[in-house]
Image (tube, grey):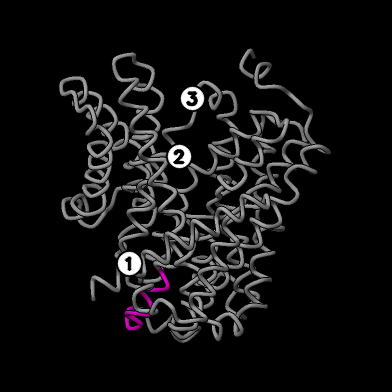
Amino acid sequence: MDIVLFLGYLSILFAGGAIIAKVARKIGIPDIPLLLIFGLILSILNVIPKNIVEGSFDFIGNFGLIILLFIGSFEMEWNVMKRVLDVIVKLDILALLIVWFISGLVFNLVFHLPLLSLIGLLFGAIVSATDPATLIPIFSKMDIDPEVAITLEAESVFNDPLGIVVTLICLSALGLAKAENPILEFISLAIGGIILGVIAGKFYEIIISKIKFDDYIAPFTLGLAIAFWYFAEGIFPSLSNGYEISGFMAVAIMGLYIGNVIVHKKEHKEDMEKVAVFMDELSIFIRILIFVLLGASISIPLLEKYAVPALICALGSILLARPIGVLIATAIPPIRPLAERIYLALEGPRGVVPATLAAMVYTEIIKHPEMVPKSIAKLMPPTELAGTILVATFMTIIVSVILEASWAKPLADILLKKKSKKETLSV
């Protein structure tokens, strides 16, 4: 590809995306819907060729998720999070699995597939992860119970890698990725990722205690996070007969360890501030790229063909799967107040992880339609499979963000008793 053209495309994505995001902030709405629409406009005008959009997600998707998972977990406050840890665990395991299953059932019903078809379950896995980052600016302007806010934020940080794990298992079951034993694969991906993340955090702590990186601490931190991700995703499978460790889970746990252990050591405080600033700034670039490129990957014919069924799938995941999943999961003792559980059930917007996974799955299938097994292709041709999942995910993201950002404050005023940060921290 012509490097001059490539840089020209980047200028459109970054400058245009920044203007759009600024407009969103100015009018007081989340930037995700406008970034997606901006990308869709670029697609309509054919400003950036489809092959460039599709080819870019392999790199941007993986690199972006490493950045976003690291900074999300890095900024989690363990002292507050541990008070609602039981709720977070329920949401990230049981609720996620229920959302996955019900979203998949709705997709299969809408597209007239067998009820338990793996095609629908792949969609359910992709949209199971939440992204309340879109709500953080709204929460900052509300007198909301900090425990509720931290529950939603922490749920997102840790269901992101779990959503990726479930998606990989669905891809394996579909024959679109290597598969061994699904149960062992889940244990290897999730538990292995947690263990590797702790090792990564401790290794990082040892290195920076012996070497003073000064201005180079941020690139070293990013480089080491990528290195452990690469070990998990690229090296470990060749050593373990095909089983994998989730590099994304490892990065999230590494970020959590660094943000809650190393950050509080006086000798590393200045370095950790540099890391936080660098990762925060870089995450802005990544968010713009991911959402604009997702919008740009959808053509008008694709949208026209699947818009209505995709909207039904989106509403099914937002208004049916999420509330059922959360209410069932949080019914396990100790039980939080019902009003709080309802609020959690109605606030789980989708964002970066579903966008990235859907775009990556779409581009891989479009590039290699022969990889779809014949048994699956009989139910839904590869191009239709890729298109329906992409558009349904697009709809789920944009509808969930618009709806849940709109009703976040009114619902909080109705459902939640006000509790100040000071009261929460003193508990």
Q: Main secondary structure of the magenta part?
A: helix
Residue at which label 3 appears:
78
Tag 1: Cα neighbours inside 10 Å, few (<14), some, or many (≥20)? few
Q: Are marks 1 and 3 in contact (CB under 8 Å)?
A: no
Distance of mark 3 from mark 2, alpha carbons? Answer: 13 Å
Task: Please name which of the two marks, 2 or 1, marks the residue nearer to the observer.
Answer: 2
Residue at which label 2 appears:
72
Badge 2 amino acid: Gly
Distance of mark 2 from mark 1, alpha carbons? Answer: 28 Å
Task: Please name which of the two marks, 1 or 3, marks the residue nearer to the observer.
Answer: 3
Residue at which label 1 appears:
177
Residue 411 vs residue 125: left or right?
right
Distance of mark 1 from mark 3, alpha carbons? Answer: 35 Å
Front-lying residue, 60 or 40: 40
Q: Which residues are magenta?
A: 361-371
Badge 3 amino acid: Trp
Would you place residue 327 above or below residue 357 in this image? above
Residue 226 vs residue 93: left or right?
left
